[in-house]
Image (cartoon, grey):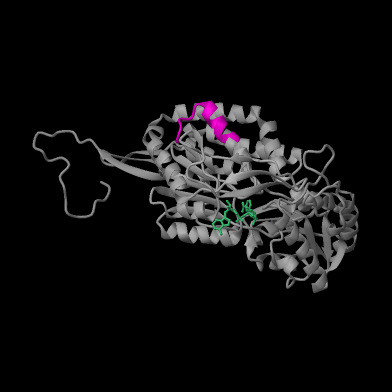
Amino acid sequence: MSTEAVRTIQHRIGGVETAGVSTRTARVWNPATGEHQADVLLAEVADVDAAVQAAKAALPGWADTSVMRRSRLMFAFRNLVEKHTDDLARLVSAEHGKVLDDARAEVVRGLEVIDFACGIPQLLKGEYSDQVSTEVDLFSFRQPLGVCAGITPFNFPAMVPLWMHPIAIATGNTFVLKPSERDPSVCNLVAELYAEAGLPGGVFNLVHGDKVAVDALLDHPDVAAVSFVGSTPIARYVHERGTANGKRVQALGGAKNHAVVLPDADLDRAAEHLIAAAYGSAGQRCMAISVAVAVGDAAEPLIGRLREKARAIKVGPGLEAGSEMGPVVTPEALERVRGYIGSGVDAGADLVVDGREIDVRGDGFFVGPTLFDHVTPKMDVYRDEIFGPVLVVLRVGSLTEAIDLINGNEYANGTAIFTSSGQAARTFQRSVQVGMIGVNVPIPVPMAFYSFGGWKDSLFGGHHIHGPEGIAFYTRAKVVTTRWPEETADGSHDRGDLHFPTAV
Ligand code: NAD
């Protein structure tokens, strides 16, 4: 490990990079080499307050900025993000560890949310009803909430924040982002791009930090709404504490996504997609497939194909050409994943491919693709979100059993079915209690103009994220009833009456 001083990643408050009063820091690793490559500041309560005050000061001007100007600014920001796709992706890969192409794809999926936010004039159109009662008209429109906060996970350091702030800002709110402390740098570049696009200082603020910063946001009286994405225990906590403090909260949690493979599926294709969905980004995706449910005769041929393909994956540094799968994010993550592999073996599952045997040069946090067969619902490797490159296979006798298994799981983010039967697919999509469903599509992440979200312990709160529900989350409606009575000679018109008004 190098003893040279490393750079310190700063907050950005009111358009200015600052350390505020922060003195605590966290290590940012290079997961591919095991090096300590930077320190990130950890905000104190006063830093969070400074960011919220900057956002509050910018709010009246920004909320009053015309919707066309907000849209044009989003468009300028969008073009800068597109221009800097590679720079953003390199920062993601360097700190997260995912391979560069995957990091680029994450930036592109985030860009699509900005594309969506550019359409804000259309998205914010209200409704108008003429003559709902005699001489009475009725219309609705939506206004921003105020200062909104985002708290985001390490696994999509560019995309997940982009699910939030473009929509919050386009709808006229100001924003404080608290990204993951494990791979924070990309958000500093995003903040610079907003400034270059012409966003007034204070509309987008960045505070780095840990639980201290999160709690300060959840308790701050001037924060109107909180969007959270991360693990289920923290999502539940954020939702409970934020709503107890009177805030609007959407909190997306963890996942254990099942893919059902029926015997009538194209098994070559299904195995290829399962491999990509289980091991892409070293399994550190909330929509990763971590459970394959093999129905009936599908099991044997499927396992054979998965074994062969899992062994063929090229594991290596994310920034090295040819790598298909990078390391996991931290030494702790590596220990956790290795521990789960041991626990699966101890519980009696059949370890078909052992990722602990992988040998990549250097001290990076590498664990290879791992495949378990004959896993049962009671085993930890089935029940827990491992969040690493571990795919477990459960064998069941029928589609009904597969659906029951999925519906018995506490997580309900995404799921998929591989089949050539339209009827089986229809039964599946209507019966599974899961928010996002793929039919022969292993990672069914909706496009930005739809909303993203799971059910049960994968999401707390009433709104999914981005798309139409994102617009609804970051705004609230006003409904206005108007009457402009004509004067009559005898004043008979428009008399008040003590009975409850009904249409006339
Ligand atoms: P995490 O829950 O550890 O951290 C998420 C955020 O919460 C970070 O900003 C972190 O600083 C903060 N945090 C951590 N511990 C806290 C505490 N005790 N009190 C207050 N705040 C705290 O999640 P992670 O490890 O960064 O990300 C991986 C998790 O996120 C996985 O569970 C994954 O499934 C989930 N995830 C879900 C979605 C989704 O859309 N549902 C998307 C991406 C990731």
Q: Is residue 403 left or right of residue 362?
A: left
Residue 49 lies left or right of residue 38; in this view the side is: left
Where residue 175 sits: x, y (%)? 47, 41
Is residue 198 shown in magenta? yes
Q: Residue at x 42, y 48 (%)?
A: 223
| Residue under the image location 73 percent in, 69 percent down | 380
**Is there any visible trace of residue 448 in the rendered image?**
no
Residue 310: x percent and y percent? 86, 53
Left or right side of 126 for 309: right
Q: Indicate the quadrant where residue 354 lies.
A: bottom right
Q: Choose between 59 and 462: the one closer to the eye.
A: 59
Q: How many marks?
A: 0
Residue 247 appears at what percent x and percent y? 42, 53
Predominant secondary structure in magenta? helix
Residue 161's x, y, as percent? 58, 43
- At x 69%, y 51%, the residue is 285
Q: Nearer the viewer, residue 489 or 292?
A: 292
Task: Single out the residue that lies furthest toward the left.
Answer: 490
Where is ligand 1, by quadrant?
Answer: bottom right
Question: Is 78 drawn above or below residue 312 in the view shown?
Answer: above
Residue 85 appears in the rendering: yes
| Residue bounds of the magenta highlight | 189-202
Q: Does 317 lie within the magenta span? A: no
